[in-house]
Amino acid sequence: MTSQVKVSADDVAKAASFRRWDLSFPDKLERRFEADTAPRRAKALEAVVLRTVVVYNLFLAGDALLVPDSFNLSLIVHLMLVTPWLLAAATWLRRTPDARRRNLLVSSIPLAIVGGILWVFVSSRSPLASHYQYFVVLAVMYANSAMRPSLVYGVAVSGVIVVAHGLACLFHPDMPVAATITASFGLMVTIGVTLTANYYIERDIRRLYLLRLRDNIAAEGLQRTADDLARMSHVDALTGLANRRGVDSYVAALFAASQAVARPFAVLMIDVDHFKGFNDQYGHPAGDRCLALIGAAARAVLRDGADILGRYGGEEFVAILPDADLADGLRAAERMRQAVERLAVPHLRSQAGCVTLSVGVGTGSLGDAASLTAAIVAADVALYEAKAAGRNQVRPSPPSLLPSGQTARAA
C-alpha cells in the first residue's frame, strides 16, 4: 500500500477514535484512502455495471409479461437510453480518479434504471401493471447491494426514488391506494435495510483499512530504522564519509557487478601530514573539525555517483575510482592535495605551515578480485614513499607493483 499522501500513526489513531456520521475520515486521511483504494474500487464498479447491463436487459421478459401494451417503449428505454448510459458510465468509472465524480456516476445508474421502470409503468394500462412497479424494489436492492454508493449519495438517491415511485403510483389510474401505500412502505423498508447493511460494510472496510495502514506505517518505521542503522554502520559519524565497512561494501558490489569485465580502477591512500602534532598543538576537537573539512574538500574533487571516498581509520582516508587508470588516479590525487592545501588550515608543527596531504596511488582491474589487495598494497607503498620524500605530495606505486601495461605518467 503506497501513496503520495503521507499520514502518520497519530493521524490513524485520531481517525480510529473519531468517526463522522458519513464514515469519512479527516481530510488528509480521506485523500490517502482514496489514493489507495480508488483504482481497485473503480475497476470493481466497472465489472458490476457491465454485469448490470446483462441483468437489466434480462428483465425485458418481465416487461413482455406484465406490460405488453408498453413493450415497445420498454425496448426503447432499455436498448436506446438506459443501456447506452450504463456502458458509458462503465467506461467513465475506469477513467475517473475523483471520488465525487465516481459517486455521481454510481448514483446515476439506479436513477436511470428506476426512471425507465416508472416511465413504462405510468404509460401502461395493463391489468398487471401494478405488479410491474415492484421492479423498482429489485432495482434499488441490486444497486445498493452490488454498487454500494457512499452513504450520503445512497440516502439522496433513495429519497429521490421514494418520491418518484410514490408519485407514479399515486397518479396511476389503475393503482389502488392501498397497493400504493403497501408498495411505498415495502420500498422504504428495502432502502432502509440495504443502506443499513451498506453502512456496516463500509464501516468495516474502513476499519480494516485503518488497521492495515497502521501496520504498514509501523512496518515502514521499522524498515526506516533498520535502513538508518545500516547506513550508520557504513558511515563515519565524524566526516559523513563511508567508514571502512562502507568502503568494503561498495568495493564488493563493484567487483560483483564487474566480474566478467576487465575495467581498471585506481586506489588512493591518503594521509594527513603530521596530524598527531596538530592534535597536540590545537586539541582533539580542532582535530575532528580539521578531518571533517579535509573529508569535504577531498570528496568535492571526485566524481559524484562513481568514486567513493572513505575514512580508513584515524587520519587516513581511501578513495576508489572505478574506470580510472594510474594517470587518472594521479590527477585526482593532485586535485585533492591542492584542495586541502587551499583550505590553509594553520599547522604550526608542519613545515608547510598549514595542513597538507600525502597521497599514494595504486591501480588494479575490476575483473580480478585479487588485484584489489595488490592495488591497496601498492598505494600504501606509494604513500610511504611520499611521506619519506617530505610529505605534501602525490606518488604513484612503484613500477614493480603496477599491473602490466600501465606506467606512471605525470599528473
Image: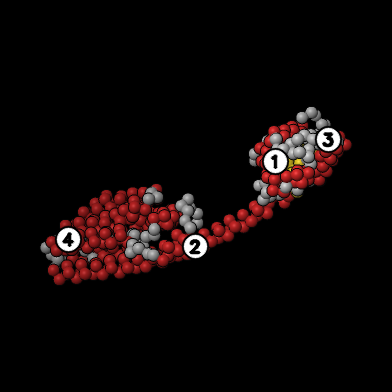
Q: CA distance from mark 4 to mark 2?
A: 50 Å
Q: Which residue is mark 1?
A: 294
Determine the CA span between mark 1 and mark 2.
Answer: 44 Å
Quarter assignment of residue 379:
top right
Note whether 219 is above or below 260 in the view shown.
below
Q: Residue furthest right?
A: 400
Give the mark nearest the N terminus, 3 or 1: 1
At 70% across and 43% down in the image, what residue appears? 290
Q: Earlier in the sequence, mark 4 or mark 1?
A: 4
Q: Amino acid at mark 3?
A: Gly
Whether residue 241 is visible here, answered yes or no, is: no
Q: Gap in Å between the C-alphas at discs 2 and 3?
A: 63 Å
Closer to the observer: label 1 or label 2? 1
In the rendered image, which residue does mark 3 sit on? 390
The image quadrant of residue 220 is bottom right
The amino acid pointed to by label 1 is Ile
Q: Position of residue 361 (x, y in %)?
A: 79, 37
Identify the element where label 3 is drawn. loop
* Number of numbered discs overlaid on the protein picture: 4
Tell me which label, 4 or 2, sits earlier in the chain: 4
- Taking depth in this image into account, of 245 and 91 the one nearest to the observer is 245
Q: Which residue is mark 4?
A: 168
